[in-house]
Image (cartoon, grey):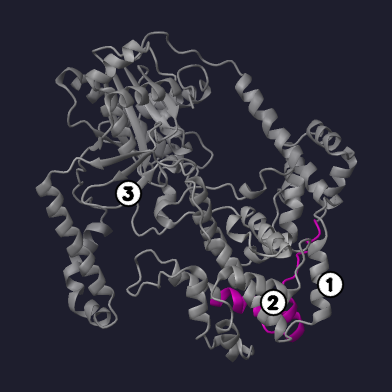
């Protein structure tokens, strides 16, 4: 807040309210590095009933299961009377209260009104929709990351929008005269513009927090995108004003609508007073929370019963192969199937970045990719082991490809291009249509530039975090995961979240290479971790689309070729089992709900007799039951 100390006290309080509202918004990361984010991240410090009441007021959203869904679970017996009684007592209700509430429809939440909402009620014009559309049109161009031919000016969010809106005639055509001139007359400093808009709206420190939160909710996800810039800057000890300036943009729309008389002043006074009322947990929200708790208790009860079942204990003999996978749910299926395919293989679960928070510069690229959880700032920079000629040739090829792509999308050439160059794509269309794989690209291995002391310390920290400090098998697979998809704008969401929305191959190869170094092993021995000389670490990448695993075995020594082939064979069987298991749950999957050997079975691998498959599937189910027995334990 140091930048705001010269402002009057009332304005400082509004700045603080804006800061509080911005922290209520969860971040949304860009498409090239999408990771899952808790949608209630901004409410983590609150009781979930209070958070539910808050979100209902600012956006009409619900945190809890729909009541009819809970009612169906009660009718099916999934939620028992004991679950309902325990939940009711914990929330201050009687079991009868919950039984009455479950089949009854929950009332619609009362959402706070903005000036745009009041203006729509007054004249019937969809002002909220127009505000959303105009801001989104500008934001899509402003936040573009290299796709647009004409990039937006890099002059700050407020300055860029002010330049856009002061020439935008759409609001005036829609019935808001003088909008462009009013925006042009606003101060160039976003903080001054924020203060002026708040003054025009008559905002008080009591009404501002909820009102600002409500405005940010109306920005169609742009607030979440800006919040990721704000959140990342804070993580790295910096400051970003994008979200604050975006809030200022939305406030100016409100102020102009109010000044133009589109919203009746008495209605705005009432709405402002409602914004000043503290968030309270009403009875309906408390009932929803109690029904949710009954469901939660039923799930916990069933899980506890499942975990309490006597586990099938595997052999105590040392494994021939160990395999460390990401704890992503898609890899968990493959782990079970892999253990079922070969009793001498044991798997380990760990976060898919394998303890290496790195910023990686790939082959023929100057872009540093953060291959680490978004909570962490990459502390190590790595690069591809490029040969100079190979790197230069790849850069020429990539630049040619980009130039060709820009030519295809250019305004003049786009129309004639399809007619003239269409036949040139026949081969590609046939290859893609028939599912013929293109030649696989061999990426150069990544290089880890760290002093030896840090290499040893890093290796020790990772192995201890994985609980892998003894009992090493002759061959240890370090397997990341990724997803090979085509034309998917959300492709990064299918990659490894622990690797920042990238595939986990770089991290797996870095760790395997680190643990194979003779000097590192000598240093680990002095710290109480002895890796046998006959142990070799091998990196791999699990494609979660095809459930095939690519092994980076170019340097696998002859002494471990037999284990390598054994692993390759087991992975092929495990991939088949995993695909078969998934097929049972696909929409319109034949035999859905039947056993793995039922009529829903698809595609038997060449060389594998159909008679062997049911036995392997039964072993996969046994591996599932053994979870937690030591053969399949998670070591996060």
> Who comes first in sequence, dot 1 or dot 2?
2
Residue at 35 percent across and 60 percent down: it is 487
The residue beneath circle 1 is: 270
Which residue is more in the foreground, 539 or 330? 539
Label 2 with label 3: CB-CB less than 8 Å: no
Residue at 44 percent across and 33 percent down: it is 351
Secondary element at image label 1: helix
The residue at the far front in this view is 6
Image position of 5 (left or right of 166): right
Based on the picture, tell me whether residue 112 belongs to the magenta stretch.
yes
Based on the picture, tell me whether residue 36 belongs to the magenta stretch.
no
Viewer-nearest of discs 2 and 3: 3
- Magenta part of the chain: 106-134
The residue beneath circle 3 is: 368
Label 1 with label 2: CB-CB less than 8 Å: no
Please rate how many residues cluster around mark 2, counting C-alpha atoms within 10 Å: few if below 14, some from 14 to 19, many from 20: many
> Who comes first in sequence, dot 2 or dot 3?
2
The residue at the far top in this view is 316
The residue beneath circle 2 is: 116
Residue 220 appears in view: no
Which residue is more in the foreground, 293 or 532? 532
> Who comes first in sequence, dot 3 or dot 1?
1
Which residue is more in the foreground, 131 or 168? 168
């Amino acid at each position: 807040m140091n930048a705001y100390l010269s402002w009057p006290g009332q304005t400082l309080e509004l700045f603080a309210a804006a800061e509080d509202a911005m922290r209520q918004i969860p971040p949304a990361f860009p498409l090239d590095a999408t990771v899952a984010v808790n949608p209630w991240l901004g409410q983590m410090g609150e009781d979930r009933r209070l958070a539910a009441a808050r979100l209902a007021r600012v956006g009409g959203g619900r945190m809890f299961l729909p009541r009819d869904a809970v009612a169906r679970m009660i009718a099916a017996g999934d939620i028992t009377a004991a679950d309902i009684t325990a939940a009711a007592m914990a929330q201050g209700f009687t079991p009868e209260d919950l039984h009455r509430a479950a089949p009854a429809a929950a009332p619609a939440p009362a959402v706070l009104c903005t000036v745009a909402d009041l203006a729509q009620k007054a004249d019937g014009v969809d002002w909220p929709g127009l505000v959303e559309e105009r801001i989104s049109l500008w934001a899509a161009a402003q936040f573009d990351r290299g796709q647009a031919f004409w990039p937006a000016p890099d002059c700050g969010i407020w300055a860029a929008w002010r330049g856009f809106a002061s020439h935008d005639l759409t609001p005036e055509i829609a019935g808001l005269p003088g909008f462009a001139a009013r925006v042009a007359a606003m101060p160039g400093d976003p903080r001054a513009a924020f203060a002026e808009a708040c003054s025009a709206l008559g905002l008080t420190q009591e009404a501002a927090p909820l009102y600002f939160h409500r405005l940010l909710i109306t920005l169609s996800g742009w607030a979440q995108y800006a919040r990721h810039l704000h959140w990342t800057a804070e993580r790295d000890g910096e400051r970003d004003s994008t979200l604050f300036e975006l809030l200022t943009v939305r406030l100016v729309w409100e102020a102009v609508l109010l000044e133009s008389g589109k919203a009746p002043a008495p209605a705005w006074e009432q709405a402002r007073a409602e914004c000043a009322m503290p968030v309270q947990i009403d009875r309906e929200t408390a009932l929803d929370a109690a029904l949710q708790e009954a469901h939660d208790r039923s799930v916990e009860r069933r899980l506890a019963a499942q975990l309490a079942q006597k586990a099938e204990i595997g052999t105590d003999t040392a494994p021939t192969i160990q395999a460390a996978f990401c704890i992503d749910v898609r890899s968990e299926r493959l782990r079970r199937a892999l253990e079922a395919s070969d009793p001498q293989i044991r798997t380990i679960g760990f976060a898919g970045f394998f303890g290496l928070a790195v910023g990686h510069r790939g082959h023929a690229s100057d872009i540093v990719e953060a291959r680490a959880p978004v909570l962490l700032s990459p502390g190590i920079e790595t690069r591809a082991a490029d040969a100079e000629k190979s790197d230069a040739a790849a850069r020429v090829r990539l630049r040619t490809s980009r130039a060709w792509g820009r030519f295809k999308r250019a305004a003049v050439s786009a129309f004639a291009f399809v007619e003239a160059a269409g036949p040139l794509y026949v081969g590609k269309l046939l290859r893609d249509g028939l599912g013929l794989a293109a030649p696989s690209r061999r990426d150069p291995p990544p290089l880890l530039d760290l002093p030896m002391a840090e290499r040893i310390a890093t290796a020790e920290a990772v192995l201890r975090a994985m609980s892998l400090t003894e009992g090493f098998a002759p061959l240890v697979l370090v397997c990341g995961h990724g997803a090979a998809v085509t034309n998917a704008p959300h492709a990064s969401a299918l990659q490894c979240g622990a690797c920042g929305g990238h595939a986990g191959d770089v991290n797996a190869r870095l760790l395997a290479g680190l643990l194979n170094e003779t000097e590192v092993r000598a240093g680990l021995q002095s710290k109480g971790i002895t890796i046998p000389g006959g142990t070799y670490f091998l990196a791999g990448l699990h494609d979660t689309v095809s459930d095939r695993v690519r092994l980076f075995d170019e340097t696998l020594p002859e002494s471990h070729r037999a284990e390598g082939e054994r692993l390759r064979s087991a992975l092929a069987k495990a991939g088949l089992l995993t695909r078969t298991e998934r097929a049972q749950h696909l929409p319109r999957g034949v035999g859905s709900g039947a056993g793995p050997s039922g009529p829903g079975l698809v595609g038997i691998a060449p060389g594998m007799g159909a008679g062997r498959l049911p036995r392997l599937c039964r072993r996969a189910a046994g591996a599932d039951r053994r979870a937690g027995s030591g053969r399949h334990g998670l070591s996060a």
